[in-house]
Amino acid sequence: MMVKVGEGKASCGQVTAMTLGLPSTTAVPATRARLPKDGFYRHANMTARLRRRFTDEVESFVMLAQISQSSTGITAGDSVTAIYVMGVELKQDRLPIEVLEHIARVYGEQSRQRARLLFVCVRRDVCTLAVFRSANVAQGLMEGRVYAGEPEEASRIHVRLDPLNLDAAWNAMCAQIILGDTNPERVDHRIAVKHRMVELTREIERLQKAHNRTRQIVKRNELWNQLQEARLKRKNLECDNLT
């Protein structure tokens, strides 16, 4: 698979701005789309391990689209003024999480945290969308990290642009990838709830198994109380996520 940089609009395999459902006005001309791989690390202060990630896991980078007020008519947000859509041609099936995080942090610093990146990771005919979401301690997200959606056939990947403003557009993209919906409201809070739900489900399974194994009455009662408490917490979170 080659990243096309000839005439017309940029593409990464079968994926273009238009196949993603984005306006043609956001598409980057192919002649200006290629991003030299070594440009991300030539002058960067990074570990040898991360540098190897760039060379071993990524074939090439291409900028597919730039979503901004001028290219879409969608008003800039209080936090986000541009969303760049970057095609990442992969050398292997594993997503280069560390590479994506490094690039997202660099773009954030260079834009004073006003630009965001939507990664379109392509391996043969399969495409995976990914985003870096910054920490939001007030909403329960204790650290920034890369989130990836489910791999799909490239022809089936579409991105919805929320027309309210670019803050909402970015939040809706993140919700689509991380939460399976396009609701731009309370995204960080809902991600934190999702994380906590997973933790509680694992804890409930652990407590249930421990309770079933234990024969000592006092210990069984203690485990039962802990199990009921964990179930109540999960139920409350489920209700909170619906409001």
Image (cartoon, rainbow, N blue to C red):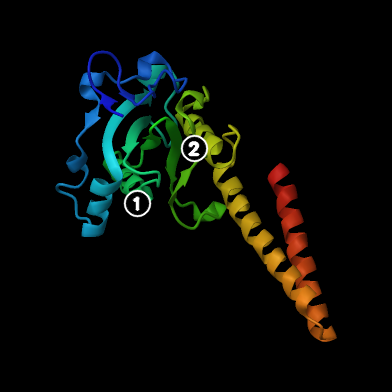
State the image quarter where residue 224 is shown.
Answer: bottom right
Q: Residue at x 35, y 24 (%)?
A: 65
Query: Is any part of residue 243 visible from this angle?
Result: no
**Above or below, 214 relative to 235:** below
Q: Nearer the viewer, mark 2 or mark 1?
A: 2
| 123 lies left or right of 211 | left
Spot occupied by residue 132 in the image (x, y as percentages of width and height): 42, 44
Spot occupied by residue 222 in the image (x, y as percentages of width and height): 79, 79
Spot occupied by residue 96 in the image (x, y as percentages of width and height): 36, 47
* Residue extending furthest toward the left: 43
Q: Residue at x 31, y 41 (%)?
A: 91
Q: Amino acid at mark 2?
A: Pro
State the image quarter where residue 206 is shown.
Answer: bottom right
Q: Earlier in the sequence, mark 2 or mark 1?
A: 1
* Residue extending furthest toward the right: 217
How dense is the environment of label 2, judged by Cα within 10 Å: few (below 14), some, or many (20 and up)?
Answer: some
Q: Quadrant of the N terminus?
A: top left
Q: Which residue is mark 1?
A: 98
Query: Is any part of residue 16 visible from this angle?
Result: yes
Q: Residue at x 22, y 43 (%)?
A: 40
On residue 42, the disc is none
> How many numbered discs sit on the rendered protein?
2
Q: Which residue is mark 2?
A: 151
| 167 lies left or right of 87 | right
The answer to whether marks 2 and 1 mark residues whose Cβ atoms lie closer than 8 Å is no
Return the residue nearer the eye: 205 or 45. Answer: 205
Mark 2: secondary structure: loop
Spot occupied by residue 12 in the image (x, y as percentages of width and height): 33, 27
**Above or below, 179 relative to 154:** below
Mark 1: secondary structure: helix
Q: Amino acid at mark 1?
A: Glu
